[in-house]
Amino acid sequence: MKYTLSVLVEDESGVLSRISGLFARRGFNIESLAVGPAEQVSISRITMVLPGDNRTIEQLTKQLYKLINVLKVQDITNLPCVERELMLLKVHTTRSTRAEVLEIANIFRAKVVDLANNSLTLEVTGDPGKMAAIEQLLSKFGIIEIARTGKVSLVRESQVNTEFLRAKQ
């Protein structure tokens, strides 16, 4: 199973390297990692996606709290959250396929950020499922390059789980 951890840390040099070193020493893989300033000055939020089980995540959480610059660790895997990723996707196009690629981009609300004779670069923002879906649809045209951010996530204050609501419809 994949787990999502939200970690608040003091914004000091070397914090990320100490955290990644902790994971490396214990042989854990980080599937996705996003770091940026948090709501307070000199505090950063790290959002990471990790494979594992409950026991492994509990151990990692305890180990993270032992690091001096870690302020808060929260397992947000099963909490109602807003999750987003950003993906830049360069797709091979020809005159005959460009319209179809643009139609798919329009359906996914992707923005065209670069246009060349033989390719189109799209900016796609959304949840991880949306990223997988558009990538799968555009793969038949030939994907030249992909760059993705890690998943960023915040817990919903409303506590409304949109995934649950989507399943009910």
Image (spheres, helix red, strand yellow):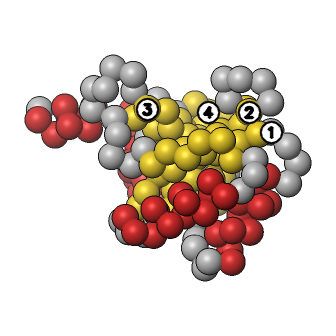
Question: Along the horizontal axis of the image, is 108 left or right of 30?
Answer: left
Residue tagged 4: 112
Residue at 27% x, 32% y: name it: 161
Q: Is residue 58 above or below residue 76?
A: below
**Residue 7 is at least partly visible in this image:** yes
Measuring 50% from the left and 38% from the top, which residue is drawn there? Answer: 153
> Can I make out residue 115 in this image?
no
**Viewport quadrant of the N terminus:** bottom left
In the depicted view, which residue is nearer to us: 127 or 112? 127
Residue 114, percent across and down? 71, 37
Q: Residue at x 11, y 35 (%)?
A: 168
- Please report whichever mark, 3 or 4, sits nearer to the chain's N-terminal start: 4
Q: Helix, strand, or loop for circle 3?
A: strand
Mark 1 touching mark 2, by CB under 8 A? yes
Residue type of the residue flagged with mark 1: Asp
State the CA–CA distance, disc 2 to disc 3: 18 Å
Question: Which tag is nearer the camera, tag 3 or tag 4?
Answer: 3
Most extreme residue toward the left is 168
- Mark 2 or 3: in front is 2
Measured in 3D between alpha carbons, the distance from the residue under mark 3 to the one under mark 4, in whole angstroms, is: 30 Å
Q: Which mark is residue 43?
A: 2
Q: In terms of depth relative to the viewer, which is nearer, 160 or 167?
A: 160
Q: Give the image quarter of residue 136.
A: bottom left
Q: Position of residue 79 (x, y in %)?
A: 35, 40
Q: Which badge, 4 or 1, comes first in the chain's sequence?
A: 1
User: Which residue is denoted by mark 1 in the rendering?
Assistant: 11
Residue 147 vertical placement versus 11 (above, below): below
Viewer-nearest of discs 2 and 4: 2
Q: Which residue is mark 3?
A: 155
Q: Which of disc 3 and disc 1 is earlier in sequence?
A: 1
Which element is circle 1 on?
A: loop
- Measured in 3D between alpha carbons, the distance from the residue under mark 2 to the one under mark 4, in whole angstroms, is 34 Å
